[in-house]
């Protein structure tokens, strides 16, 4: 909601991916999808729950 996300990486299999995509696009973020069949996708799933973002600025 703050517009802090510059890039969002979402697992293709994530349940609420469409909702995240719409919110990110409305704030001008780039969206990238990745499959959990890739090692990086599996790591994102285990570590971050299926979505990770690169921010425009630091959030405190």
Image (spheres, helix red, strand yellow):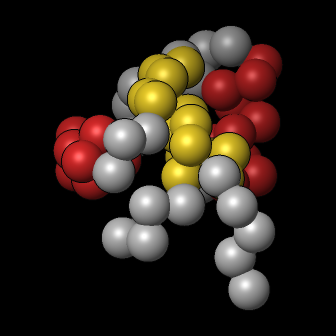
48 left or right of 17 in image? right
- From the viewer's perspective, is 48 left or right of 43? left
Asked if residue 20 can be seen in this view, the reply is no
Residue 6 or residue 37, whichever sits in front:
6
Residue 46: image location, x then y, percent? 71, 48
Quadrant of image for the C terminus = bottom right
Q: Residue at x 44, y 29 (%)?
A: 31
Q: Is residue 56 left or right of residue 12?
A: right
Residue at 44 percent across and 61 percent down: it is 3
Residue in the picture at 65% in, 52% down = 56
Q: How far across and down, in percent of the image, does residue 41 sit?
A: 66, 26
Quarter-wise, where is residue 57 in the image?
bottom right
Q: Residue at x 61, y 15 (%)?
A: 37
- Is 6 or 22 nearer to us in this picture? 6
**Nearest to the observer: residue 21 or residue 3:** 3
**Residue furthest to the bottom:** 60
Who is closer to the viewer here, 1 or 51?
Answer: 1
- Say if residue 19 shows up in the picture: yes
Which quarter of the image is occupied by the N terminus?
Answer: bottom left
Examine the rendered structure and indicate whether residue 3 appears above or below residue 29.
Answer: below
Residue 13 in the image: x percent, y percent? 39, 31
Q: In screen coordinates, is 33 left or right of 50? A: left
The picture quadrant where one finds residue 18 is: top left
What x and y, as percent, mark residue 10? 49, 35
Q: So how many labels did they put on this image?
A: 0
């Amino acid at each position: 909601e703050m517009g802090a996300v510059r890039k969002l990486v979402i697992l293709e299999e994530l349940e609420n991916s469409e909702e995240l995509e719409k919110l990110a696009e409305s704030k001008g973020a780039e969206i990238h999808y990745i499959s959990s069949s890739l090692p990086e996708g599996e790591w994102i799933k285990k570590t971050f729950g299926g979505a990770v973002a690169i921010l425009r600025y630091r959030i405190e």
